Amino acid sequence: MRRHARIGVVAVALAISACAVTPTHEAMAVHDADAAMVHGCKFVGYVSGTSGWSGLAADAGESNAQNEAREKAAKLGATDIVWQTVRSGWGSTANGNAYSCLRTND
């Protein structure tokens, strides 16, 4: 009986993790930052993302919402996001400020 319960838990965990949306290459290039990291960068816009996943799938929902916001930031030419809110409730949301920062190779 316990073996079946473990298999069920593993199956649910795999199903939830499979719900995460893979971001595009452009979105993966948008970095998480804090206010100090974007000092002197150009503000390019406010971005947000949503996902219907919450509850047991809250992690996947928050990840999906952040990925959607990163996609929007990439389209604005952003290199960094400072997250304002990332949360789950009756769905998941992520909101942040997108910035374009010049990177130099020292």
Image (cartoon, rainbow, N blue to C red):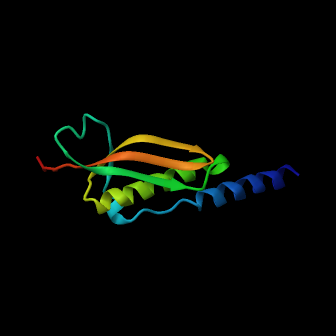
x then y, percent, for residue 40: 16, 40
- Expressed as whole percent of the image width and height from the top left, the position of residue 78 reads 26, 54
23 to the left or right of 34: right
Above/below status of 33 relative to 75: above
Residue that appears at 25% across and 38% down = 37
Asked which quadrant contains residue 51, the reply is bottom right
Is 33 rendered above or below residue 103? above
Q: Is residue 43 left or right of residue 8?
A: left
Which is more toward the observer, 6 or 14? 14
Q: Residue at x 66, y 47 (%)?
A: 55
Task: Tell me: residue 80, above or below residue 15.
Answer: above
Q: Residue furthest bottom?
A: 24
Whole-percent x, y for residue 35 in the image: 28, 35
Q: Residue at x 66, y 54 (%)?
A: 13
- Return the residue found at the far front: 46
Total labels drawn:
0
Residue at image point 50% right, 62% down: 21
Residue 49 vs 96, above or below: the answer is: below
